[in-house]
Image: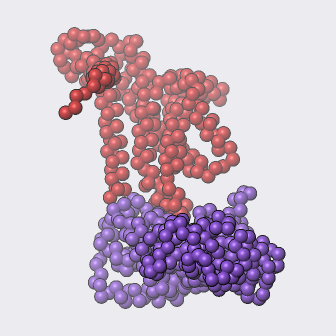
Chain colours: A purple, B red
Amino acid sequence: MNSSTSVAPSEIQPMLNQLQQELSAQAVGVTLRNVTKRYGSFTAVENINLEIQAGSYTCLLGPSGCGKTTTLRMIAGHEEISSGDLLIGERRVNDLPPTQRNTAMMFQNYALFPHKTVWENVEFGLKMRQMPKAERASQVNEMLEIVGLTKFADRKPAKLSGGQQQRAALARALVTRPQVLLLDEPLSALDENLRVKTRSELRRLQKQFGMTFVQVTHGQDEAFALSDQIIVMDNGRIDQIGTPSQIFQRPVSRFVARFVGDNNIFMGKVREVTPNSVQMEVEGIGTLLCCRENQPAEVGDSAACSVRSDSMSLRPYPPDDLNAPNQLTARVVSIEFTGYVTRVSLLSEATGAEITYKARSDDWMKQPVAEGQLVSLSWSSDDCVFLAH
Amino acid sequence: MTKRPLSFYLLAAFFGLFVLFLYGPMFAIFLLSLQGEEGGLTFPMRGFSFYWLGQVFQEQRVGSFTESFVRSMALGLAVVLLSVIVSVMAGLAFRSRFRGATLLFYLTISSLIVPSVLVSLGIGITFQVLGLETQWFSSGLGAHLTWTVPFAFLIVLGVFNRFNPSYEEAARDLGASDPKTFWEIVFPLIAPSLIGISLLAFTLSYDEFTRTSLVSGQKNTLPLEVFGMTTNVTSPALYALGTLTTLFSFTMITLAFLTFRFFSKRQAQ
């Protein structure tokens, strides 16, 4: 049934252009003001403030249970807001049902209706909006054409590949012309190769349509690759908001530094504070000079700093100056060749702390160091980020 | 081929006995219902005829199989309809944990272990107190529902346990109202299970005896009629009736199975 009238490839471009104009013209931002979600005595999301720009790609990043999905579901209207304000564009939508928010959600595992064909799945939203049948049919056909599923219109979701299911879900979400698209881990059901491919396809679509995308993910790679803005969440709070490079280069907390990847974190006492630097004393290692942006710091505070594993330099022991800051002595425990990068695990001689060092494999092979050897690691104060909490 | 151990043969023989025990009596009754016109209630067979099968549809000295069969059918269908509606609605309600849900759940389930004859007696007394006449389609129907609804409810709970709520969220996200969400999404997805529930409810109702025994009023359901006849009718018509109802049951099961397959196939395409 509903066999789609076939559309010649040359007709896709004008269709695309029109859809693109429609979608980008109506894209709006999302604002959360002091939003809190409580379940009984449990607080899932605590007092978060957030500004999402119209036409941007934003990722909510964090471990499971950090409140990122709850936040997305509050924006979608599938979860009530306990207190605070949610604005989509200029409208306060706290008490509006999902349909009246002009958002569309792509669910984890897509939630395609298993008893309906691809065509019927895509049609569903238009049917519920009581669009006349003829108009409905032409819009569904057009959308299936755009995502390249025209040939599969009469199939049930179970008979589609993972990538096709993903595109069907996308078509179902986009056909209602939402102002904001909300995506709940849209890539988690795909295998590794397809995930990378689909990821760039999502990003391309978002740019092409100029739409506002808000996505939940627990993978930092995914967030880095997709986002204009990343919101790192932990324990129901926002830890950091920033561009991918800000999050990567300038984490603001120990949590972000750990979550974002192979950062080495040192704990110590603040000795000296200047407007853009902090001097710390770390037991067993000595003096560390860190750069500081606006993080609060007081002399005598317990604090931490983080150094990325790929911004350290490794030399045979002993170093030129044993008393220079920003260096430590460590013993190589294991070496992993992972392709482009070689990853080296070390143990600090003084504190026994685990240290990770990463180098481009080509560079590493020029002057390899054997397991068990004593080395000296050092870094510049620009690469040593002061963490206030 | 590897040699099978002794235990295989012992277990196979045991299983054979089990099957014989299960179907042997039914087969004997099936044979006896084909007695010749002169035949009696026991072996040996005296000839072979369809005479007794025909007799079932004739008026008997003490009543009529046909009428009680029609009654049982009507009652069974009413029971199926009500059981499905009530259990699905209860199942939907139990998805949101309301106050007293656990208590209500245990009350419903524990009603199954109350001796059936007491349930029947209770319903009978209640009707008497209220000054109502017991009838197969009122008190009898109620008695059947006390038996089928808890079972149906248990199954529905299991069905909704496995039901992915994100389908409903997706429907709502796309603008479906709650009734639309139910009829467009939930109902088609649970339909195969509802056929299973219908079949179970019908079977429970169709051969229900104890709960109905004291509250069927003037007119008998089929099982009550058959029981009454065992003391009066002394012809192979009784066996013929057994054969016919068994065939009827098999037909129902086959129909239910085919419908179930139809629905699941439509989903898998």
Image quarter in which the N terminus of chain B is found: top left
Q: Residue at x 79, y 79 (%)?
A: A271
Q: In the picture, residue A29 is in which quadrant?
A: bottom right
Q: Position of residue A86 (x, y in %)?
A: 67, 75
* Residue occupying the far left of the picture: B47
Tally of marks: 0
Q: Is residue A327 left or right of residue B267?
A: right
- Answer above or below: position of A9 versus A129: below
One can see residue A309 in this view: no
Image quarter in which the C terminus of chain B is found: bottom left
Q: In the picture, residue A362 is in which quadrant?
A: bottom left
In-front residue for pair B68/B28:
B28
Q: Is residue A32 left or right of residue B201?
A: right
Q: Residue at x 50, y 67 (%)?
A: A371
- Answer above or below: position of A276 versus A376: below
Q: Position of residue B22 (x, y in %)?
A: 34, 23
Q: Position of residue A139 (x, y in %)?
A: 40, 78
Q: Is residue B142 left or right of residue B255?
A: right
One can see residue B110 in this view: yes
In-front residue for pair A363/A191:
A363
Q: Residue at x 50, y 26 (%)?
A: B212
Q: Residue at x 34, y 73 (%)?
A: A149
Q: In the picture, residue A89 is in which quadrant?
A: bottom right
In-front residue for pair A265/A37:
A265
Q: Position of residue B101 (x, y in %)?
A: 65, 44
Q: Is residue B103 left or right of residue B258?
A: right
In-front residue for pair A8/B79:
A8
- Answer above or below: position of B49 versus B81: above
